[in-house]
Image (cartoon, rainbow, N blue to C red):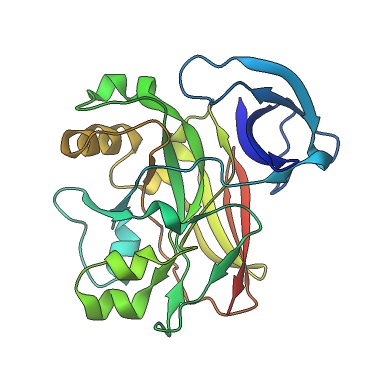
Amino acid sequence: MLIARVSFQSEVHFVSVEEEPGGSDLPADARLRVIDTHPFGEITYTGQELLGSQVRLLAPVLPSKIIAVGKNYAEHAKEMGGDVPAEPMIFLKPSTSVIGPNATIELPAMSQQVEHEAELAIVIGRLCKEVPLERVKDVVLGYTCADDVTARDLQRTDGQWGRAKGFDTFCPLGPWINTDLDPGDLAISCDVNGDVRQESRTSEMVRGVPELVSWISTVMTLLPGDVILTGTPAGVSPIVAGDEVAVTIQGIGTLVNTVGG
């Protein structure tokens, strides 16, 4: 199932997408079934149906927290001048950094080097703590595309990553959540203005989805809608005003955002 979050006549709804759209947006004739309240737990429907032409795509979820994993692709760790850490290295991005498809990444005046980071995002589906590896599937709602936008110069100078990763608009998510996806070996890429900057597969992650969810859940309680960013492949590079950034993940689609001033 594909689950999207949309705006319709000044109201926000979760919807299931009845036909797989692919790409980065909902086709005008896509049939959308409105989900009653939210998709966490047993999904029920209101009986209302919408068309793709009637709605605007939003970020597919508004998490209470975003937990991001650093240096989870060996080649990216190498390009950053370091090794893969002995344990997962995690940091938090604020919920206010989230934007949806087709929204604008705003470049902060205090940074001169902002970069893209294409990532597979895990969306948690139920409250959980200390999840065994074999139970991870039970607590995951699905997967979406993410861009862990980073002020690289501030990351270097600050010595910690809160500011560099935390600006408003620095966590694009979307375009929807795929709930029926095996995340073990998916193609992942990032294009900037049509030029491929990052290209890899999720099988190249040092630690896969089960290990990450299980380990992180020993550190903190995960809530429905929380998002885990699983790390970025090699090839991160600067983005500037006027760029169009597209993160594509096999089986999900493409998350497109423009870069503003």
Where on the picture, by quarter, is residue 207? top left
Where residue 250 sits in the image (x, y, percent)?
58, 42
Q: Nearer the viewer, residue 120 or 11?
A: 11
The residue under the point 61% across, 24% down is 1
Q: Is residue 103 visible?
A: yes
Quick one: which residue is furthest to the left in this view? 86
Quick one: which residue is furthest to the right in this view? 29
Where on the picture, by quarter, is residue 240? bottom right
The number of callouts visible is 0
- Vertical comparison of 39 with 153: above or below: above
- Vertical comparison of 158 with 248: above or below: below
| Drawn side of residue 46 relative to residue 201, left or right | right
Where residue 71 sits in the image (x, y, percent)?
28, 58
Quick one: which residue is furthest to the front in this view? 10
Where residue 155 sits in the image (x, y, percent)?
29, 74
The residue under the point 24% across, 32% down is 214
Where residue 105 sits in the image (x, y, percent)?
55, 67
The residue under the point 45% across, 62% down is 117
The residue under the point 68% across, 17% down is 46
The quadrant in which the C terminus is found is bottom right
| Drawn side of residue 151 relative to residue 213, left or right | right
| Drawn side of residue 142 relative to residue 87, left or right | right
Where on the picture, by quarter, is residue 128? top left
Q: Is residue 27 visible?
A: no
